[in-house]
Image: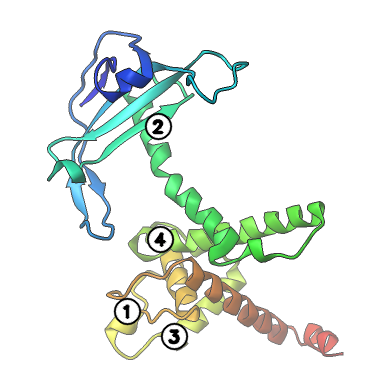
Amino acid sequence: MCSSAPYGTGPWARRAACSARSPTRRKPAASPSSCRARPGRPARTVELAVRFAAVSLRQPRLGADRRDPGELTLNMVEVREIEPPSPKEAVIWRLLTTHTVETCADACRIVDLYRSRWRVEQLFRTMKSQAIDLEESLIADGDALERLAAAALIVATRVMQLVHGRGAAGQAFTAARLFSPTEISVLEALITRLEGKTQKQKNPHPVHTLARAAWCIARLGGWNGYAKERPPGPVTFSNGLKRFHAIAEGFALASNPHEANVCAR
């Protein structure tokens, strides 16, 4: 169910003066959405109601800069679970945005943007502390640090592409999104060595897919390859990429003896 309606009651009424731009509009309930598992809460399918309206946020009485405007007009989108298992487990999001929200499609787009926040947080966590550890850099020069941060962002993006490309999701993409033809050849050669004797230890993904490449990089990073185990994360993929790049560089040198001799000298 999606509607445009004022928030005239409840806690929001105490904090915001709200105005609806149009009469209430209702549409059929959207398709059920999946609620991912987290510690203490199993995954489940939920049905959500979406509301949206323009709201005017008043300036706080205390601690505000009086040079700022007295009110700030934004759009608010509320997502509320219909018939949750219990009030404590209900999915309730209230999102404030400067984006235009005039239709149910606009509201759903804002919700999708918010759902992407976790990927953004994972990307910067991977870059700063979890895998690349940019925060431990001793570089003091601002320009040099900026260049290092740009390089780290590229590496972190590649790591997160592998994280999201693991499993069935990565079968829809080719390994060529991240790897060159030569690197893909190295991956295939490594897979034959990393696979075990039993079917559970085999790479289950189609040839030349991102999922197949992610399986290989994760194995190089220390993952045992069993589907029942915890999926590999950014640290595992980061370690796997470091090892893979060293192997791929050795392969390139072995394939070109002239370059290998130059390096040896």
Which is in the foreground here, disc 2 or disc 4? 2
Q: Residue at x 36, y 35 (%)?
A: 111
* Mark 3 or mark 1: whose residue is earlier in sequence: 3
Q: Which residue is mark 2?
A: 110
Please give the residue where the numbered disc 1 appears in the rendered image.
226
Of tags 3 and 1, which is closer to the observer? 1
Along the line of sight, the residue nearer the viewer: 135 or 42: 135
Q: Is residue 132 left or right of residue 189?
A: right
CA gap, disc 3 and disc 1:
12 Å
Asked if the residues shown at circle 2 and circle 1 are in contact, with their CB atoms under 8 angstroms apart, the answer is no
Q: What amino acid type is highlighted by mark number 4? A: Gly
Give the residue type at disc 2. Ile
Which badge, 3 or 4, comes first in the chain's sequence? 4
Mark 4 nearby-residue class (10 Å; few <14, some 14–19, many ≥20): many
* x 46%, y 69%: residue: 214
Q: Nearer the viewer, mark 2 or mark 1?
A: 2
Q: Residue furthest right?
A: 265
Q: Which mark is residue 194?
A: 3
Q: Total label count? A: 4
